[in-house]
């Protein structure tokens, strides 16, 4: 057996490679059935016309690359072997630099002079497509300014299946359409600057604990049935691919018992064939588990390049990928496709034209330092140039944080405050971290105002405007009690208003904070630092209490929400660096709140299905069965007729809105159940299939090696012989080199383009009927008829639009389109999207939350206000 293959087989998820090939699609309902069928070979990229020019340029280069140069572009140089979270090798001869891949979805991580934007959950709560795009542009500009080729975001997985899940806040909310629209806007914005976006994590990374496989443990398997996968978890990825995302990051966990990084059905079948993804697929960090297996399954890039044990200089690819080409276990076509995909993205974004090299180091704040810290003995040089990339992005950051703030209740119109109200402010969440700005790495602590969760999805705060700073700017009499215990000595007068700040944090599994290993294991869905007690104590003393909550996700409010003094509650989500000003913009009425909940707030955690709890088990692989299917968040509450405390989409304003004159018009007739046939695939680049000369993988003469650095070279490569036919590598069952027939649901980026045919257009007039200016969010939910033949959630968000700021009495007509896909279910037999013919029986609701519906339109009738 080839040396590296044996390791691959031990460590890799054997079921993927040894599975029988009988089933045609992913179809588990429980653990015993969970199975991911083989899908080989990997489809080549380049068949979509939009990418033809970029692929042509890539092809011209790839034709001239040596084996080692090709391999260099597929494999990271090793963890801590450069300035970024990961970097590929380079081809200096042709001006192709090491490509820098770096976090995060909310700003450039671990650097200086950057903007710390609000994270995804806050962006989702704005329901503002323009801001989604604008923030994407700003993120791209900062990535470019720092020399980051691939910014590792947006995140749309996790999707919020588990309310306690640690990284839900990195994504945009607990609904696939919200995630998809926000991700597509972000990607378009980012990539308009030339930075490459990386949508992540495909797929089922819904829990932080036990996500990773290694030599000693196996990550959990997310067992997802085909329909749920398509209609829920894959949905935002499809929108991201349609927005031409340049790269996709594969999740740590298994899906249906096959590790995502070598799951051929997932990468080859679904992502590259059905969704028509033209970019490159990269591992999550150290999620590479097998060399040949992953190459055959469609992986294109290994990050940060290390093998089973990081920092030992070993890799599943690098020299071993060179070996597998020379011994012919991995077809040379596959390597050519990997490199062509990577370079096509690079050309498509224009990174061949004056794209900056990294000018920062995520390893140190010093100006000079080790160029390859992981090598210990390394050349030293200037690593930080402290380039300021902030531009005027603080305006965007503030607008996102402000327009996300969600007013849950406002009795007696206590808000907005006036500038001379007598204010008493409680809670450490109103203030600064007493240990200093960025006092803990990757935000792995919860001190002071909570601006983001923790882990790789963070960036350093360049500065922070706390609520305390911003309130004291406006009110000269406000008194601050920046503590988590209620001061018994505080005086309360009748006119006093108490503002209590509380929070709830979570993050990535490599850091545990207060007993929470990423997921909210210890805290549950309750406020940290005795926040609930603080509110109750304030409510005992004061007759007017405002609660401000900074939170990663749903929180149980029951201990105090109905107390008489608690008049107003704001969820300020995770605001980033502009925490204070964005809040005072709302508190003092310069703007009306216009954020809406991107998730449901329940009365109790037991309101959720049992299957979405956190899972732990001492031995063996955790089987996480998605038995609840599509019934996540509000879909579940509706089905089980559970009244939530606050429904998905809820958010009050200082004014009120009326919906009138709704209309529906048919655009493209849904005259067939299934979409018209897909377009044919265009041509893909072709290359000679001859095995390159072994000398191309030999160490160059007099080469100065850096210890532990991952190179593509081999000792004595000419001794390698063809082993592909001598049974030394056990190919997965179902392995084949004959291309599959093109999937009928495919045809372009995202899938069959007819899926986005507009079936119906809805228009509705929104009028500000109150006395203050404000913005409304019209949310469009669809209900499919029984004739689609399957149990389907009774409402599903498919679109939304936000008005401009409407003055009192002012109106705006909002238009929203409903596509064929919006009205379809995934037919697992046909492997295609099936809609209700002519839209018969389809109901379209428009409202201010999933439970506050204002308009009903019937596809085969007219519209009414409700
Ligand atoms: C692991 C995280 O899961 C991923 O989101 C991140 O981009 C990489 N680490 C790189 O830091």
Image: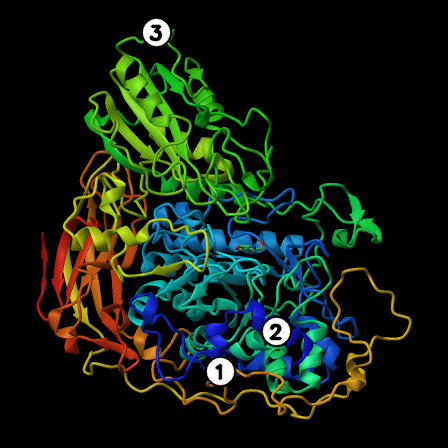
The residue singled out by tag 3 in the image is 491
The residues bearing labels 1 and 3 have C-alpha atoms spaced at a distance of: 71 Å
Instruction: Label 1, secondary structure: give it.
Output: helix
What x and y, as percent, mark residue 445? 53, 35
Mark 1 vs mark 2, foreground winner is 2
322 w.r.t. 576: above or below: below
The residue singled out by tag 2 in the image is 291
What x and y, as percent, mark residue 211? 48, 56
Do tag 2 and tag 3 residues touch (Cβ < 8 Å)?
no
The residue singled out by tag 1 in the image is 49
Mark 2 vs mark 3, foreground winner is 2
What x and y, as percent, mark residue 152? 55, 57
Q: Residue at x 59, y 49 (%)?
A: 108
The residues bearing labels 2 and 3 have C-alpha atoms spaced at a distance of: 68 Å
Residue 246 relative to residue 751: left or right: right
Instruction: Label 2, secondary structure: give it.
Output: helix
């Amino acid at each position: 057996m080839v040396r590296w293959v044996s390791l691959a087989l031990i460590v890799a998820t054997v079921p993927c490679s040894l599975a029988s090939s009988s089933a045609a699609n992913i179809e588990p309902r429980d653990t015993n059935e969970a199975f991911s069928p083989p899908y080989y070979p990997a489809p080549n990229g380049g068949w979509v016309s939009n990418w033809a020019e970029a692929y042509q340029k890539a092809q011209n280069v790839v034709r001239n690359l040596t084996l080692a140069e090709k391999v260099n572009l597929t494999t990271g140089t090793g963890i801590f072997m450069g300035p970024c979270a990961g970097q590929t090798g380079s081809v200096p001869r042709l001006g192709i630099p090491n490509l820098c891949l770096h976090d995060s979805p909310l700003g450039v991580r671990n650097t200086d002079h950057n903007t710390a934007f609000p994270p995804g959950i806050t962006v989702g709560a704005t329901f503002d497509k323009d801001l989604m795009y604008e923030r994407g542009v700003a993120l791209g500009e900062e990535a470019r300014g720092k020399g980051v080729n691939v910014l590792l975001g947006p995140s749309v997985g996790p999707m919020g299946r588990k309310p306690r899940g640690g990284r839900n806040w990195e994504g945009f909310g607990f609904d696939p359409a919200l995630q998809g629209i926000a991700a597509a806007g972000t990607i378009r914005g980012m990539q308009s600057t030339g930075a490459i976006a990386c949508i992540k994590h495909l797929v089922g990374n819904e829990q932080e604990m036990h996500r990773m496989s290694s030599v000693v443990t196996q990550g959990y398997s997310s067992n997802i049935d085909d329909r749920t996968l398509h209609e829920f978890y894959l949905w935002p990825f499809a929108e991201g691919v349609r927005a031409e995302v340049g790269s996709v990051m594969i999740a740590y966990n298994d899906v249906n018992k096959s590790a995502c990084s070598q799951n051929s059905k997932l990468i080859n079948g679904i992502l590259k064939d059905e969704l028509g993804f033209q970019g490159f697929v990269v591992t999550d960090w150290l999620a590479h588990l097998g060399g040949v297996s992953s190459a055959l399954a469609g992986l294109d890039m290994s990050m940060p390049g290390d093998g089973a044990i990081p920092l030992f200089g070993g890799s599943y690819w690098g020299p071993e990928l060179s070996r597998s080409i020379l011994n012919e276990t991995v077809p040379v076509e596959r390597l050519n496709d990997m490199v062509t995909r990577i370079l096509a993205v690079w050309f498509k974004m224009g990174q061949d034209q004056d794209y900056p090299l990294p000018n920062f180091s995520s390893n140190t704040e010093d100006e000079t330092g080790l160029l390859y810290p992981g090598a210990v003995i390394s050349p030293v040089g200037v690593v930080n140039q402290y380039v300021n990339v902030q531009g005027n992005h603080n305006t965007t950051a503030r607008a996102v944080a402000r327009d996300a703030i969600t007013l849950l209740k406002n009795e007696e119109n206590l808000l907005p405050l006036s500038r001379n109200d007598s204010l008493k402010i409680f809670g450490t969440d109103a203030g600064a971290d007493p240990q200093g700005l960025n006092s803990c790495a990757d935000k792995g602590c919860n001190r002071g105002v909570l601006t983001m969760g923790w882990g790789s999805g963070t960036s350093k705060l360049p500065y922070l405007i706390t609520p305390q700073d911003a309130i004291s700017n406006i009110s000269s009499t406000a008194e601050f009690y920046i503590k988590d215990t209620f001061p018994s000595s505080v005086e309360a007068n009748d006119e006093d208003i108490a503002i209590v700040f509380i929070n709830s944090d979570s993050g990535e599994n490599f850091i545990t904070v207060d007993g929470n290993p990423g997921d909210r294991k210890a805290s549950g869905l309750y406020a940290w630092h005795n926040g609930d007690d603080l509110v109750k104590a304030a409510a005992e003393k004061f007759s007017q209490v405002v609660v401000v909550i900074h939170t990663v996700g749903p929180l149980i409010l029951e201990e105090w929400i109905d107390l008489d003094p608690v008049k107003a509650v704001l969820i300020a989500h995770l605001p980033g660096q502009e925490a204070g000003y964005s809040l005072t913009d709302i508190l003092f009425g310069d703007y009306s709140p216009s954020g809406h909940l991107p998730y449901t707030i329940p009365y109790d955690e037991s309101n959720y299905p049992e299957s979405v709890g956190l899972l732990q088990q001492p031995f063996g692989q955790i089987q996480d069965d998605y038995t609840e299917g599509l019934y996540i968040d509000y879909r579940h509450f509706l089905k089980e007729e559970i009244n939530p405390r606050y429904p998905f989409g809820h958010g009050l304003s200082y004014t009120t809105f009326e919906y009138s004159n709704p209309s529906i018009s048919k655009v493209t007739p849904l005259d067939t159940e299934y979409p018209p046939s897909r377009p044919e695939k265009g041509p893909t680049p072709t290359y000679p299939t001859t095995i390159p000369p072994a000398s191309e993988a030999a160490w160059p003469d007099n080469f100065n090696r850096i210890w532990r650095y991952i190179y593509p070279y081999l000792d004595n490569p000419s001794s390698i012989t063809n082993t592909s036919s001598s049974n030394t590598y056990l190919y997965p069952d179902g392995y084949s080199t004959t291309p599959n027939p093109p999937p009928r649901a495919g045809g372009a980026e995202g899938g069959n383009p007819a899926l986005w045919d507009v079936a119906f257009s809805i228009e509705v007039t929104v009028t500000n009927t109150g006395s203050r200016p404000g913005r409304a969010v019209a949310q469009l939910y669809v209900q499919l008829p029984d004739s689609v033949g399957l149990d389907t959630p009774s409402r599903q968000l498919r679109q939304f639009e936000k008005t401009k700021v409407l003055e009192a009495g002012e109106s705006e007509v909002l238009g929203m389109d409903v596509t064929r896909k919006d009205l379809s279910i995934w037919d697992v037999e046909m492997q295609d999207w099936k809609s209700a013919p002519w839209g018969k029986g389809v109901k379209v609701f428009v409202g201010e939350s999933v439970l506050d519906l204002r308009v009903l339109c019937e596809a085969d009738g007219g519209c009414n206000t409700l």
